[in-house]
Image (spheres, coloured by chain):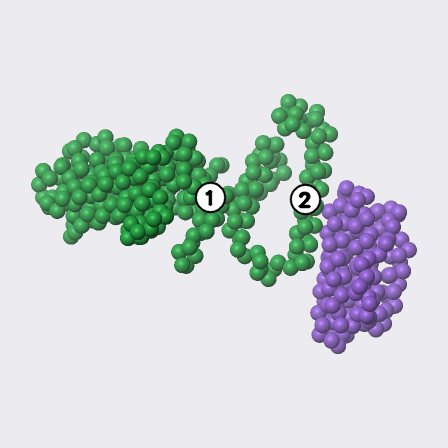
Chain colours: A green, B purple
Amino acid sequence: MTAAVFGELVGQVRAHLEAAAGLPDTALRGESAVGGAWIAGRMAHTLSRYVADIAPYGAAEAVINRHLDEPVRAAVDAREALRMAAMSLRAGLGGLRNPDSDVPFPLPAHLSAATVALAAGRDLLQTHVTSDPAGRRSPRSDWSLVITSAPVTGAILAEVAGWSRQLAVLTARMAVASAVSPGIPRRVHQGLADGSHGLLTACAAITAGQCRAPTTATDMELLHAIPVNIAPRRQQPHGEESLAELGQGIATSAGRMSVIAWATQGEGAWSPAMTADSWQWAATGAAVICHLSGCLLRLLGDSPGQLAGDPVAVAL
Amino acid sequence: MREIEDIRLRLESAGELPELLEAAWDAFSLMLAVCQQCEGQSAELFAASAFAASAAATGRRMLAVAPSLPPGQGNGTGNEAIVRHDLDEIGDGLAGLAHLLSVRLSAAVDQAADPGDRQVCQDAAAEAARISELLARERR
């Protein structure tokens, strides 16, 4: 079983946003618009958190700090615009019941599913870093340097810009549709219109910031390939594995060790269990494992007839 | 092997704690040297020999800090044993020696007056028991 990758969650966000965009105007009115506005506010907030991970600077600092490059300044602007959008969408709903707990309408359902996938995507990226109580972040996997690289942060911002634009168009349609809905307070469609404006502003800020170094298809491909950083489930040997299963088991074990090595990196130096004797025992264990691996390879290499036709036998 | 038998006799006849610790030191040194030589002579015994050698080195290092160990004993680095006999026979001899060493050191725990000696005897006895278990014929 392979680990979930960021691209899978992007696909879910895209599919649900496109499904919501394909709904007729009649599906964007009344209670559906109220439920949709609640969830659109949550989605705008989640988008702002994606951008805040990349640009953790205050608005004033972004103005006066000369060392920040253009895409980062643009990201700060986008983050503020997304926060404003989230606030506007919520402000328009003051006093109204949030109907998303029992959503019978397709619009809130699609937006809710997109928001869940969006939050899961950010959680997936966050598995590669760890934060101390002071908020300082440090790497937790080999992928962490990829995630914080300029091409991948650019790709994340480009995705956020795309989602913001889609949500902006949708909330603008909801604003118009709810304006003619009887029983929907004026502040709801005003909040939707303001939210749409904030989302469009965020999209424009990111796009403008990236005009000199636009995201390429390769950058996007790299972003989508980022896997979740959790230790794969242990595969217990049962003694009757095929060569392919053994190879998969070795890869799984290596993946588990990689995750564990990063997770325990800071603990080694002062661990009371780390003594000269424990090192000697571990080194002996490593030597024995190497010896047994050598024995296995010799055994396999000396028995080509039993593995006739197998690519592994050819390689041996 | 004559060396194994010699150390066995010394362990059995050791009366005072310093004499026992001295014999124990030589026993661990002999086991370390023989196990290291066995590593290269038999693929089947490699794992058991390597782990037993590691345990012997640990046991000897523990003895080095025993307050009652005679001066000068903790400076030696090893024994120049030469393995020429049947490996199974040597394995049996070392397993028996390690068992005897474990029994004698365990018995010395209650007799030692110094707390440092007691701790060393207890820890080194555990290492000797581990060697005995590793080299037991049913494990090889």
Give the quadrant of residue A224.
top left
Residue A110, above or below B58: above
Furthest toward the bottom, the residue is B113
Residue at the disc numbered 2: A289
Side of B66 relative to A133 (left or right): right
- Asked if labels 2 and 1 touch by Cβ distance under 8 angstroms, the answer is no
Side of B131 relative to A229 (left or right): right
Q: Residue at x 68, y 39 (%)?
A: A293
Indicate the position of residue A110 as horizontal and vertical percent values. 27, 37
Report, in whole angstroms, how far the alpha carbon at label 1 lies from the one at label 2. 32 Å
Q: Residue at x 57, y 56 (%)?
A: A268
Dot 2 falls on which chain? Answer: A
Residue at the disc numbered 1: A145
Residue A97, above or below A172: below
- Give the secondary structure at mark 1: helix
Q: Is label 1 on the same chain as label 2?
A: yes
Amino acid under label 2? Ile
